[in-house]
Image (cartoon, grey):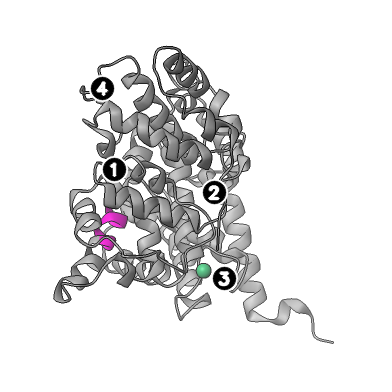
Amino acid sequence: MPLATSSPSISEDAALAALLKKLKVYPVGSDLRERDLQAVYDYLMTKDPKLEHWFCEEAPSTLVPEAAAFSLRLHAYKGVQANQWKAALAKVVSKCSSCAQGMEDRLLDCQVTWAFPAWSSHVLELITLLSWYSYMGAFPAHNVRDWLDCCHRWDTNDILQHLAQLDSHPQSTLSDLPPPVSFRIFYNTVNLSNEGILAALVDRLPKDRIHNWPPIIPAGLLLLLLHRLPLVRRWARNQIMGLPPLTQALFAKSYPTHYNLVTNILVEAIISSAGRASSAVSPLPSSHPLLENLPTTLLWNQLLSLLPILPPHIYSLPSTSGVSLFHVVVNNLRGSESSAFAFPLAAHPHHPD
Ligand SMILES: [Zn+2]
């Protein structure tokens, strides 16, 4: 019986596994050896030559998602091979929705460290919690921030390129995009900050649900429940109802998730509008562009749509300003005639298929 090590692919896997383990335990910054980067690049490009799965369970080996996570640093690189890698990544995350989610999860895990100041001073703790993030451990914080901006910019531009392809068909909607691409629009709320994408959302709003997304409510849809256009709000609500309910686990990891971040933004928006005249607009300088200058009546009315979608434990979590959603609702009820808030607090939504 031949020895396992006689297989070239097994020895190749073992060599790469050893390299990635070393780079995780002893992270390397800008002095990364070119041959090590080349080894990861070659592995990724040859292990899955059809460019189908880099980040999901269907990847041709468990090392592929690990190599793909490390390769994300190539967003900060220029040159022929870096461009080839970016083109390959674009194929993967436009073909497989789970891979699209896998890539976005890695970027968003990193993003929340900047959004929650308490965590930006605990980067070492975060590195132990987010295994892949260890690869970036040797870079100063400002370099990681710049790199993350490169990643988001690439993501947004890639989505805009897909949207541009719809221009030749004026009647097309976001449903005509590959599902992994439309999923990325709504899953990573940074993409919903781009003016071109926001314009396409209004101009090319789907008439019905988009199908073939991963079974998870993208966090951006929560923001869209507060969109100023009723048609967008209605579509977002309908899309949400076709997906499984948000679980507490999405909000209750040992580090902040982007679901915590989006909920926090929404709660802060509602808190900042509490007690204002109904005709006033809510000033939210540090919030998401989608929530800027919204009428307070809209914020309060749409809270009815939002509450049943959130796991109940979120009601009592303090926001960054120290006030919980539960307190805001109760205090508002004391001073208003509205009794409708009792319903969503007590009820859970029905999610039809
Ligand atoms: Zn995949």
User: Which residue is painted at 27% across and 69% down in the image?
Assistant: 80
Tell me if label 3 and label 4 are in contact, CB under 8 Å.
no
Whether the residue under disc 3 has CB within 8 Å of ligand 1: yes
Highlighted magenta segment, given as a residue range = 153-159
Mark 2, other Cα within 10 Å: few <14 / some 14–19 / many ≥20: some
User: Which residue is painted at 63% across and 58% down in the image?
Assistant: 18
- For marks 3 and 4, the one nearer the N-term is 3
- For marks 2 and 4, the one nearer the N-term is 2
Mark 4, other Cα within 10 Å: few <14 / some 14–19 / many ≥20: some
Mark 3, other Cα within 10 Å: few <14 / some 14–19 / many ≥20: some
Find numbered disc 1 in the image and state the secondary structure of the residue it sits on: loop
Is residue 14 placed above or below 314 in the rendered structure?
below
CA–CA distance in space, label 4 to label 1: 17 Å
CA–CA distance in space, label 1 to label 3: 37 Å
Is residue 69 placed above or below 179 in the rendered structure?
above
Residue on which the image places disc 4: 278
Decide which of 233, 33 is in the foreground and name it: 233
User: Which residue is painted at 43% across and 57% down in the image?
Assistant: 239
- Callout 2 amino acid: Trp
Residue on which the image places disc 1: 227
CA–CA distance in space, label 2 to label 4: 46 Å
Whether the residue under disc 1 has CB within 8 Å of ligand 1: no
Residue on which the image places disc 3: 59
- For marks 3 and 2, the one nearer the N-term is 3
